[in-house]
Image: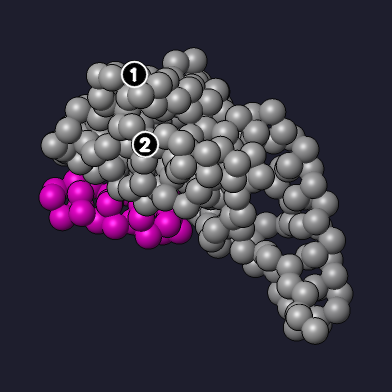
Amino acid sequence: MSEERIYLDHTSGGMLLPSVQRELLRFLVEVQAAPGGGHREAREAREELEKARQRVAHFLGAKESEGVVFTSGGTEAVQSGIRGWGESVGKGTLYLSEMEHPAVESAVRRLEKNGFTVVRVPVDGEGRLKWDGVKAGSGVGLVCVHLAHHDLGTVQSISDARKFAEKVGAKLFVDATHGAGWVPLDVEEGADLVALSGHRLGAPKGSGALWIRSGFPWKAQLEGGRQEGDRRAGTENLPTIVGFGVAAEEWSENGKSFRSEAQKAQKILAEEILKKIPSAKLHGPKVGIE
């Protein structure tokens, strides 16, 4: 008799949504042209690429789709976002906590070695950022904040981060790789740079995106081609991008119900574990997304 198992590791790797599975298989079999070509098949592929871009932009609440740059995943989006800003401005100050994802931390440390100043933001006992008392650094700045923490699940107030960024004259980078969809996010409310991971939304692994506000100082990190508006060289991985677009559309339409069901299951699971395993301890904030 086979063991019945329940998969609870969606933050590391989610399951493909059925609609994504169907579209992914269709593109793997039927669509072979690169979007950058000039023939009919390439133009058709390019239309699908731009449709996916529009879907991801809509999911983010962006008014225009041009700000979306597709990447190979969340790590590339984070790294290219932070380092691209650093190379563009030359020097400045980065503001972040000690609890950021290693992808963020490593990009920041690289810039620190190149002369950038790093200001650490303290957190409370539940992992929430405490902006009061944080002093402004010199020069231009970038505030780096996670939408939801990759271990604790703590949800940060992007509004508070935005207010602090405005106070110190800095731009705002949001690492939404672990929170997008599960936590509502509207980039028009103040983010300048947003990193996304597709597979945590039910898209294929290897799908991600970086949203860049128009006019934001940024330099491409992968050169050698004209793809993605000269912002990310290399032939686009169309099947995974299209899958990402389908997943983004599903979340735009059904995100509220997805979140509601997850909250119910999360509450039951936490309550039962704490009740039946006396030694169990909850780390982070009280269970619940809101």
Residue 199 visible in the shown view: yes
Percent position (x, y) of residue 199?
52, 49
Percent position (x, y) of residue 119?
32, 49
Q: Amino acid at mark 2?
A: Gln
Above or below: residue 68 compared with residue 2: above
Q: Which residue is mark 1?
A: 40
Q: Is residue 264 left or right of residue 76?
A: right
Percent position (x, y) of residue 94?
30, 43
Residue 143 lies in the magenta stretch = no
* Residue under the point 79% across and 43% down: 260
Q: Is residue 169 left or right of residue 175?
A: left
* Residue under the point 24% across and 39% down: 234
In the foreground, 129 or 7: 7
* Residue under the point 45% across and 25% down: 48
Above or below: residue 73 compared with residue 189: below
Circle nearer the N terminus (1, 2): 2
Q: Which residue is mark 2?
A: 32
C-alpha separation, residue under disc 1 versus residue under disc 2? 12 Å
Range drawn in magenta: 95-121
